[in-house]
Amino acid sequence: MSFDAFAQQPKLLYLLQGVAAFAAVVSLILLALHRGPVRSRAAALLLLAPALLLLTVGLLLPGLRTLALSFTENGGDSWAGFDNYVWMVTDPRALVALRNTLAWVVLVPSLATSVGLLYAAAVVRSRFRAFALLLVLTPMAISFVGAGVVWKFVYAYRPAEAGQIGLLNQLVVAFGGEPRQWLVDSPWNVLFLVVVMVWTQAGFAAVLLAGAIRAVPGELTEAARLDGASPRQIFWRITMPSIRPTLLVVVLAQAIGTFKAFDIVKTMTGGQFGTGVIAHEMYDQAFRYGETGRGAALAVLLFVLVTPFVAHQVRAQRRAA
Amino acid sequence: MNGVRERLASRAFTSVAVVIAVLWTTPTLGLLLSSFRPEEEIKTTGWWTVFGTPHLTLDNYGEVLTAGGNGSGRLAEHFVNSVVITLPSVLFPLVLAFFAAYALAWIDFRGRDALVVGIFALQVVPLQMALVPLLKLFSQGWLFLPAWNLTGPARFGQIWFAHTVFALPFAVFLLHNFLAGLPRDLIEAARVDGASHGTLLLRIVLPLARPALVSFAVIQFIWVWNDLLVALTLSGGTAETAPMTVRLASLAGTYGNEWQRLTAGAFVAAFVPLLVFVFLRRHFARGLLAGSVKG
């Protein structure tokens, strides 16, 4: 036994201190709101100040700083012009990461949303709806890291003589095939990582789409049924148009999440065998190889790629609200 | 005729759902069963053989949680870290975003609309983009900001900071959308009665906003508990401050074939979020639905 509960005390103490300090700040703000005159501008300033301060120090300025860093040599001291961006579009390894990111961002949202939609439509009128949705949502609770472990196990490889412990190779062997190292052969290994991301994301899509399908007025589908429409017609002519806003939000959210996902690659292959993606490559360059400039350039690229998706989503969400 | 076709269609639908459910649960089930098998058997035979020769043990969990060796997960310590990281990282942005969302939704002041758009727009900045400068800020200081140079448990402080900041734009967005939709008469009436903003905020808006607040708390909890990137870059990676995700990822990399640790470790790490999902799934869905579905 090496776990010493007593040794954990400083951490818990620090937690208490942190929460107490925060509570003190919040109380001060509330007190000032109560005592002070009801002058609106002062109240707004008081309430907004903490969030604005944090956003400026923690997000806005660092973002700008990364932009600046992307034009400098590794340590951030000497000017490098567009070197880092040139590296990004010429270096074979960086190009592989770009190619893979493209594959991820096309495949993950489309597959995860299709599976989620199919599943949602199938279980939405079932008595076991809540349980059924929980089943596909579970991978999301397991975390990307946990999902990486789950699927590494599914893909586990043993030489043909030995007994297989990975489910996929066992199936291959059962059908008379040779066991394969799924995560090693580029470029197909990228697809095996995409499967993992789809697996974690389909439940999210299913839950949102099930909610949307349930919100479609029952009179509408009932009337169509009485008019003799087939289930397929009802689905394509009535359900689909009604849930389109949600569908859009789901696809956009999946795309945004896919751009930034880094954990699956980190856990399953560490970016080896040509499986890197931009988010993971950025981490490797900036934090493992000390190439801050290159990492920053990749982060800027990520920002540029995500922007239209986020903008679209904010608009879609506000329009629907 | 129509009835038969309908029944066939619905049966096809049901079987598709069953296939998906099986595909989605089998990998997890395999890992879960394996985590209860003795090390020797995990490494030599497939988990499906457990149905023939059921040897089950809790050894893997004991080892991954508390055993001393280097290869052990020592996950009990990391579990404490995950808790210490997650609680403030949910509480802080929740309160601050609620304040900001209230001000943006219900106080009139010049430049308000620009501020709303500006904060929403910050959702665009991927956290990857802020990490390098944040690390520099913490270690060396920057411009007028002094270095933090945190050591020991104080490192938790910088993780709280990062998670709070990264959550704020989305939290403000979510809560603002919700608060702006509250009935205007209610708030106007209270204001006419002479209620201060403090009273309005605590007595009227807070109870009404509870569904949105709970939703955000659930989403943020899952997000922070499962986060790897922020933890990896800011926690220092030691048993003193790193959360379970970091330890599990490093086990997967360094001890990639030690399945007895990985299988048990994955479930120790997933235990709390799974509980949250089972009990609060509805809130999770409601928060995500806010603004995307009417009603």
Image (tube, grey):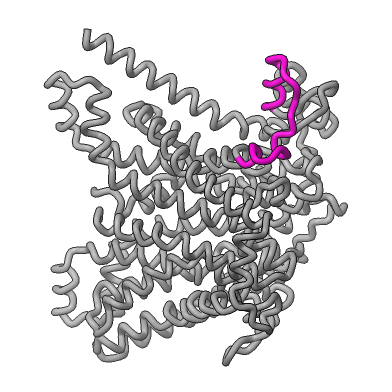
> Residue B32, image x and y in percent?
66, 34
- Residue at the spot 56% in from the left edge and 53% down from the top edge: A261
- Residue at the spot 41% in from the left edge and 31% down from the top edge: A119
Question: Which residue is at the front of the view, A257 or B154?
Answer: A257
- What quarter of the picture does the C terminus of chain A occupy? bottom left
- Residue at the spot 46% in from the left edge and 39% down from the top edge: A112
Question: Which residue is at the front of the view, B37 or A79?
Answer: A79
Res A39 → quadrant: bottom left
> Residue A32, image x and y in percent?
36, 87
> Residue A179, image x and y in percent?
75, 25
Res B118 → quadrant: bottom left
Q: Is residue A173 magenta?
A: yes
Magenta segment range?
A167-190
> Residue A62, image x and y in percent?
54, 77
Question: Which residue is at the front of the view, A25 or B179?
Answer: B179
Res B195 → quadrant: bottom left
In the picture, measured across the screen, residue A51 lies left or right of residue B137, that is: left
